[in-house]
Every structure is written in structure tokens, then in C-alpha cells.
Amino acid sequence: MTRTMTDAFPRGQAAIVSSATFGMGATPGYSAMELAVQASLKALKSVGLTPGDVDGLMICLPDDIFSSLSLAEYLGIKPRITDNNRTGGSSFQTHCALASMALATGQCDVALIAYGSNQKSASGKLVTPLRPSIYEQPYKGIRPLSAYALAAARHMHEFGTTKEQLGHVAIAARQWAQLNPDASMREPLSMADYLGARMVSNPLGVRDCCLVSDGAAAVVMVRADRARDMVKRPAYVLGAAAATTHRDITNMPDLTTTAAKEAGDRAYRQAGVSPKDVDVVEVYDAFTINTILFLEDLGFCPKGEGGRFVADGHIEPGGSLPVNTNGGGLSCVHPGMYGLFTMVEATQQLMGTAGERQIPSVNIALAHGNGGELASQAVVILGSEAAL
């Protein structure tokens, strides 16, 4: 018997009604769980909810494989739905997809998605569970940095992308961070500063790499009919999709095309929108090459044109396509995994609560997550009531 995949999604039937961050930068004295709890309590309180109201719980902590069970115990609750899917930084977009379907089918009434990490104060360096395969080990690459350096080098070779074009990604992120009081890095960054930065894994230098920080984030989701009574501008989930192409970078089919192409195409179809309809884009910019790859794969510019697109100023404040408006993982925050922070920023832009960096008249926002070494890609498309 042949089955046809419909990829159906409960478009607009669930919404994010609250988002919060906590402890961004350096927060000594907190465990990863304690940071996640603080963000969760903050998000719940802002819409008049308590932990006891939560019956759908999704979390992925870097140091606890049973994190959904641990968080439920910490909060003193007994949720009906739990998940701690571990696909890296894309985990939270997959949590959003699960929460949307669970809410739409009545399996839960209030879903909480949370994350926390004390990576900076606990270790002071990037910590990753990734280990080299037997094929990669002899080359002694820096995980995960060297994997992204391979992608950057290939993009340069194939499309003529330049170091300066990568620099425009870092500079744009810093310009957005200067508008965000919660961002960790707000000092001006010039092209000379960028080009003069220490090389880490050729062609990527220090300013091509994400921050190592502490931080936590949380979002609260409910069904659409309830959302309208809780907040003025809910962020309705219009589409959510994920795709995976490999685990180790040496098995990536094409270093210049990621699974964000497939995930994005499916999410757009679910949402009934196209890239030209998107008002603000939040992509997982662990490294400068990420932004270029994902803008191409998500349809915002042709394949191979990402370097020129960012160099023309399109993603900077005042440009035609606002990208990573909080400063991204490059200049705002990157506590091990960044995916939930893209959802927080996309939600705040839709709700009109982003302060000085607020983009006018946002009705469609895209939040993207990247897991592993360009391996797992997940996309959530959020919309205002006008987009329903």
C-alpha cells in the first residue's frame, strides 16, 4: 500500500502569547536548569499563568538528557506532554511544531518551551557533544568550527564569496546589537576590526564565530481562541517544518546547500506564504557563513548570491530585509544553543515590543534553527492576526 505524505499542519490554530529571556551574557551562580526556570517563570507570569497551568513541557538542556523530566520535577508539575528532542540548536523549532499539533488536537492546553545554559560562567568556552568520526579524526579539526570553515571555503571556491562579504554579516549583527540593551557585544565593529581579528580555522576568524555566553529563553503557547484574550498581538504559528541531511560534516551531500531549503519550502507551503511575504528573518548565525547559506536556502536571494546580498546592505538596520534584529548569536547571545532565541525575537517583533530595534508593521516573521554541523534544519513561520 502506497502512502502519500500530505505534510498537513494546523495553520494558525496555536500561538505564542509570551516570550522571555534571562541571564544573557554572564550569570555566575546559576545552573543551566535554574536559568531555564527563571526564563520560564518570567514568561508565564507576564500572561498571568503559573507552572501549574502548564501541561505541555518541551526543553533541551546541554547537560541533562532527561531535561523535560527534570524541569517538570523542579516546577512541581505533571504535564501530559513532554519532549526533550535533542537535535541541537534546531530542537526548539521542532518543539514548537509538536506543541502546535498537541494544542490543536487538545492533548495539552498550555505549552512551555524552555532552554538555559551557563556555558560561559561554567567553562568559559564553547562546549559541544560532537565528536569526530573515524574519517575526520586524523585531521584534528576544531569541532564544530572547522566544519563551518569547510562550508565557508567551499562557498568561496564555488561562488567567489569573499572574506569581506563574511565581514558584512558580522558588522550587520553588531549594528543590530547596538540597538538592543540586552545584547552582550555592543561596541562598534568596523571592517578593519573584522579583518584584523585572529584567525581560528581558515577562513573563519574570531569575529566570524558566535559568542560564548550564559542565557535562557522561554516561550508560552496556547490555542488561538484563548490567545486573543491573553495578549493584544499573539504570534500565530502558521507553519513549522524540519529536515536533516547528515550527522557528520563529511557526509553532508553539498557543503553549500543545507536542509533549510527543504524545511523552508515545506513551512512556506504550510503557512501559505513565500519569502517575499516575510517582514523579519531570524536565522541561526553561529558563524558568518550560516547567515549567507540560510538566506540563500530560505529563498531570500539566489544560491551563490548571498555574499553580494549582505555586502549590499540588505540585512543591516535600514536595509530591505531585517535579519537577526537582536544581534544574533554573533553579537547578542549564544549559550551553546541559540534556536529558541530566534523564536523569542521573532515573537517580540510581531508583538511590537522590540524597542529601538522594532521593525514597523511586522505581520510575518521567520525563526530558524540549526542543529549539529549544518545537519538538522528547522523553520517556524509566525504571523499576526492580519496574516491568518
Image (tube, grey):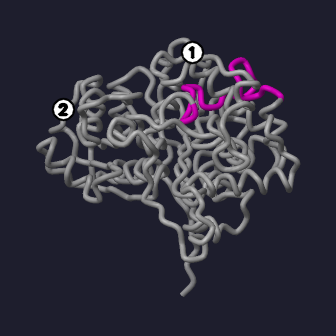
Q: How many marks?
A: 2
Considering every residue shown, the one lying at the far right of the view is 160
Q: Mark 2 points at which residue?
A: 50
Name the amino acid, label 1: Leu
Residue 179 badge = 1
Percent position (x, y) of residue 111? 30, 43
Earlier-in-chain disc, 2 versus 1: 2
- Corner quadrant of residue 357: top right
- At x 31%, y 56%, the residue is 83
Asked whether the viewer can see residue 274, the reply is no
Q: Nearer the viewer, residue 207 or 18?
A: 207
Q: Nearer the viewer, residue 280 or 135?
A: 135
Please indicate whether residue 294 sits to the left or right of residue 2 in the image.
right
Looking at the image, residue 24 lies above or below residue 302: above
Q: In which quarter of the image is the N terminus?
A: bottom right
- Corner quadrant of residue 121: top left
Percent position (x, y) of residue 200? 63, 45
- Corner quadrant of residue 285: top right
Please indicate whether residue 96 sits to the left or right of residue 63 in the image.
right
Asked if the magenta segment contains residue 102, the reply would be no
How far apart are labels 2 and 1 at the CA level?
32 Å
Percent position (x, y) of residue 75? 15, 41
Asked if the magenta segment contains residue 327, the reply would be yes
Q: Residues within 10 Å of mark 2 (few under 14, many from 20)?
A: some
Q: Residues within 10 Å of mark 1 (few under 14, many from 20)?
A: some
Looking at the image, residue 106 lies above or below residue 36: below
Looking at the image, residue 98 lies above or below residue 26: below
- At x 52%, y 18%, the residue is 180
- Residue range in magenta is 312-330
Foreground mark, 2 or 1, reads 1
Q: Is mark 1 on a helix, strand or loop?
A: loop
